[in-house]
Image (cartoon, rainbow, N blue to C red):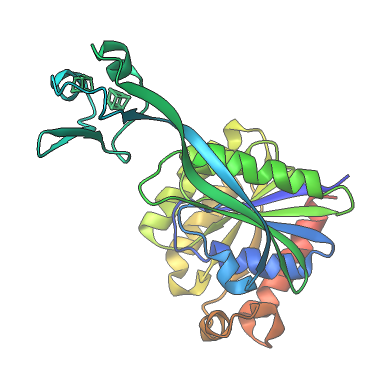
Amino acid sequence: MFKQIAIVSGKGGTGKTTVTAALTHLFKNNIPVDCDVDASNLFLLFNPKTEKQYDYYGGKKAVIDIGKCSSCGLCAEICRFDAININSGEYSVDNYSCEGCGYCAIRCPEKAIELFESRSGEYYISSYKEGRFIHGELEPGEETSGGLIAGIRKKAIELADKTDYIIIDGSPGIGCPATSSITGVSYVLIVSEPTLSGFHDLKRIMETTEQFRRKYSVAINKYDINTEITEKIEKYCSDKNIKITGKIPFDKTVMKAVQESNSIINYNSPASEAIKKLYKNITEEIK
Ligand code: SF4
Ligand code: SF4
């Protein structure tokens, strides 16, 4: 049976995706999954080729049949989301603002409004040089990413019967996309950075992870840019009996690896060594 490992962070920009990409190279026989559908970056490092594409429908939107509309204006008056536009006397629905509540359709005297499933994004099974990769993308302005992430993870599980791990690049933050990335996983790695905001966000994502009762640990990326906050993070985690499984130093080679679309573990560098150590610690943790 495969294990699911989610790599998350309390905010974006902590180096979560770089760490995830490196771990997908180190954990053998895995399926990488990019659940950061609002700012999908893992595919940039993998350069994948799409094999299959699936549409994601995240909810309904209202559509006005102009042929039936008498231009009474009631729908624009009652829509709480200001989703009805009037242009040259013609009424139409702004897809980005419409929440699909259906109230306008109920109230329209001409029965000119219907609700239709709206395509909110897509997800893909792709191939890259080390195997298969599942990823997705939300349409600009769409907010229903939790459902898209659930779809992506379901697809990964369907394909994972002969694999040992599903490695998930989770959505940053503590909202619905982040929790959708954590639900049901075997293990969570939180990637943090030693800044004041990074420490604050780390505490929030730790609290969120604890609510899911998942085993987890913390890695501190660029730990040497502020050793004072790093020590505070270490003490905070120690007080909560949470392991620091990795401390990755600031290393310019990381940027070089990203620019060359390569994994940091393919370079001889301090960050590369630290991530290999992190991998070993995680394998011990999830035994
Ligand atoms: S409520 Fe119906 S008839 Fe009136 S403007 Fe809206 S769509 Fe047209
Ligand atoms: S379905 Fe709801 S949100 Fe959308 S246009 Fe109608 S009243 Fe507004």
Measured along the vertical axis of the image, is residue 280 above or below residue 135? below
- Residue 267: x and y in percent read 67, 86
Measured along the vertical axis of the image, is residue 8 above or below residue 45? above
Whether residue 179 can be seen here: no
Instruction: Count how many numbered circles sit on residues in the image.
Output: 0
Describe residue 115's horizontal placement relative to residue 85 as left or right.
right
Whether residue 55 can be seen here: yes
Q: Quadrant of residue 48?
A: bottom right
Residue in front for this viewpoint, 229 or 55: 55
- Residue 73: x and y in percent read 13, 22
Q: Residue at x 44, y 74 (%)?
A: 225
Residue in front for this viewpoint, 135 or 189: 135
| Quadrant of picture, ligand 1 | top left
Q: Residue at x 51, y 60 (%)?
A: 40
Describe residue 181's horizontal placement relative to residue 205 as left or right.
right
Q: Quadrant of residue 131?
A: bottom right
